[in-house]
Amino acid sequence: MTHPSPAATIETLVLERWLPAPVEAVYRAWTTRAELERWYTAEHGWIIAIHHHDPRVGGRFEVSFTPPVGDTIFEEDLYDAVVPNERLAFTMTLRRSNELISTTHVTVTFAHEGTGTKLTITDVGPSARDHEQGWTPALEELATLLATGA
């Protein structure tokens, strides 16, 4: 894992997914605690615990991810934009124990596309590209949840 330093290079990770549900359902999956608990995970088999969830400007999202083996990862987000059914933006800080892994800025946009939603995640900051390993399984879980309603 790359650790940020004052001279760290700023990276940009952009992930786009078409999801088989209306924008309102996809947005609700991102902003409702019960929905997040069903899909927001870094890997299959990890235990997720949401400690705080307040999706409003100035609000926080705090979650921990515990792998089957190894140390728990803690995520703390601070929302700076919340536009219902359009956009979420937040600063995301990841830690393992007391060690900083990364701090990046994430923007999530929701757009009507055909019979579903085009979701775009833009993650910017040192080590942003490393986050693909966490975003990818989470988005797979979200797509499955939305497709099956399970």
Image (tube, helix red, strand yellow):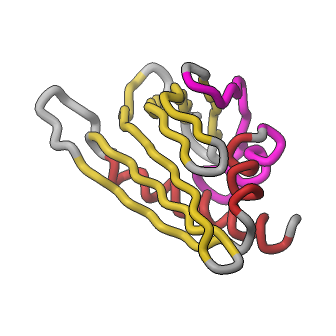
Viewed as shown, does residue 77 lie left or right of 53?
Answer: left
Q: Nearer the viewer, residue 40 or 24?
A: 24
Is 27 magenta? The answer is: no
Exactly how many numbered labels are in the figure?
0
Can the viewer see residue 32? yes
In the rendered structure, which segment of residues is drawn in magenta? Answer: 33-57
Is 34 magenta? The answer is: yes
Residue 64 placed where, x, y %?
63, 33
Query: To which quarter of the image does residue 18 belong?
Result: bottom right
Residue drawn at point x = 77 percent, y = 44 percent: 37
Which residue is situated farthest in the right direction here? 150
Viewed as shown, does residue 87 lie left or right of 38?
Answer: left
Q: Quadrant of the N terminus?
A: top left
Query: To which quarter of the image does residue 66 belong?
Result: top right
Query: Against 64, is 45 above or below?
Result: below
Which residue is situated farthest in the bottom direction here? 114
Viewed as shown, does residue 73 lie left or right of 46?
Answer: left
Q: Quadrant of the C terminus?
A: bottom right
Can the viewer see residue 2? no
Residue 88 placed where, x, y %?
55, 42
Residue drawn at point x = 32 percent, y = 45 percent: 124
Residue 106 placed where, x, y %?
43, 43
Viewed as shown, does residue 102 lie left or right of 30?
Answer: left
Residue 71 placed where, x, y %?
55, 35
Residue drawn at point x = 61 percent, y = 57 percent: 138
